[in-house]
């Protein structure tokens, strides 16, 4: 574990220019990152969980659709808990093994990124081609799991088995509402991002997932998987009747070959829109490890 302080439809690509044969995707690929990250520096802790070398992939969603095989209708990439799937329970997750250091049994997962001019092994399978997600799955180059403190107060430990989602997998059909939190970037343009697919050239393409960090103090889940943990207000304070917990940020990097088209998996009706990017998390850290992380985050206060 590393402790740090941090500011926390068809297309052809020619060089860095996007040439489209249809108009539906014309505005989904950009070379400019038009949004700026502006946030205070806070203590943070990085937990090493690898890059899914074992290729733990499935079309399940143990947070949103537990008990329903292929319930995601698109393929997810996992790090952490090696057993996570539709059948997962608190007991099964706690009894599993993990790719993370210090026996962090948590599960962290997000939709796969595909090179859409290739062929994936699931071209005729649920979550893959049967749900409109075609192409070669691109393995991440890097995955960073970072927990950050609050800029205004100490944080409480996350409760074990807390379940979270960030981003809106239905952002396209819902008109890019308030749950849309897709953040795409390039490694050579730190502090800048876009909700569209970035053309990063030889730089690493980044996907960043920030999770809510203001807990209701009682529940490890809710019907929407959102109302029990919400996002902090401007300035970092939590809304009334919520309590700050470590803020999870997952950053995934890819070496996207220049000149090749790419897209994330999505529900078929979402048309693989980049704004539908999202991620899920189940906290299965041993309580002693969560206490250690929380202590680091509060220690510099």
Image: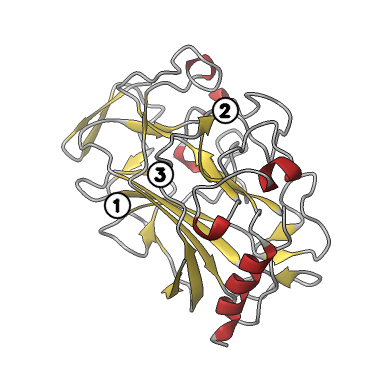
Q: Residues within 10 Å of mark 3 (few under 14, many from 20)?
A: many
Residue visible at 57% across and 74% down?
Answer: 149
Residue pushed farthest top?
124
Residue visible at 28% across and 49% down?
Answer: 204
Numbered label attached to residue 59: 2
Please tell me whether residue 47 is drawn above or below residue 5 in the rendered image.
Answer: above
Q: Which residue is mark 3?
A: 196
Q: Residues within 10 Å of mark 2 (few under 14, many from 20)?
A: many
C-alpha span from label 1 to label 2:
32 Å
Nearer-N-terminus badge (3/2)? 2
Nearer-N-terminus badge (1/3)? 1
User: Toward the viewer: 157 or 97?
Assistant: 97
Numbered label attached to residue 32: 1
C-alpha span from label 1 to label 3:
10 Å
- Give the colouring mode of the picture: secondary structure
Residue 111 location (% of width, % of height)? 50, 37
Local secondary structure at mark 1? loop
User: Toward the viewer: 257 or 284?
Assistant: 284
Please tell me whether residue 93 is drawn above or below residue 66 in the rendered image.
Answer: below
Residue visible at 77% across and 69% down?
Answer: 242
Q: Quadrant of residue 170?
A: top right
Front label number (3 vs 2)? 2
Q: Is residue 232 visible?
A: no
Q: Is residue 143 visible?
A: yes
In the shown orientation, is residue 132 left or right of residue 29? right
């Amino acid at each position: 574990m590393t402790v740090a302080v941090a500011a926390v439809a068809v297309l052809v690509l020619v060089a860095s220019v996007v040439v489209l044969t249809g108009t539906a995707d014309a505005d989904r690929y950009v070379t400019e990152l038009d949004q700026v990250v502006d946030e205070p520096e806070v203590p943070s802790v990085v937990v090493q969980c690898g890059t899914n070398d074992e290729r733990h992939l499935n079309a399940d969603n143990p947070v949103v659709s537990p008990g329903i095989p292929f319930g995601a209708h698109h393929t997810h990439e996992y790090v952490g808990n090696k057993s996570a799937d539709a059948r997962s329970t608190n007991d099964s997750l706690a009894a599993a093994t993990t790719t993370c250091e210090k026996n962090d049994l948590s599960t962290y997962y997000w939709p796969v990124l595909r090179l859409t001019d290739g062929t994936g092994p699931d071209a005729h399978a649920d979550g893959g081609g049967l749900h409109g997600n075609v192409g070669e799955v691109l393995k991440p180059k890097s995955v960073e799991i970072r927990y950050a403190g609050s800029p205004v107060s100490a944080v409480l430990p996350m409760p074990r088995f807390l379940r979270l989602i960030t981003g809106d997998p239905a952002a396209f059909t819902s008109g890019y509402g308030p749950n849309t939190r897709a953040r795409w970037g390039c490694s050579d343009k730190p502090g800048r991002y876009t909700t569209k697919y970035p053309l990063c050239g030889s730089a690493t393409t980044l996907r960043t997932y920030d999770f809510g960090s203001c807990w209701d103090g009682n529940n490890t889940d809710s019907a929407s998987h959102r109302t029990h943990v919400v996002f902090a207000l401007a300035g970092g304070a939590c809304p009334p009747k919520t309590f700050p917990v470590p803020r999870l940020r997952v950053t995934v990097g890819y070496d996207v070959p220049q000149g090749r088209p790419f897209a994330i998996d999505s529900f078929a009706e979402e048309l693989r829109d980049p704004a539908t990017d999202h991620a899920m998390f189940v906290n299965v850290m041993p309580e002693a490890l969560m206490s250690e992380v929380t202590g680091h985050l509060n220690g510099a206060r």
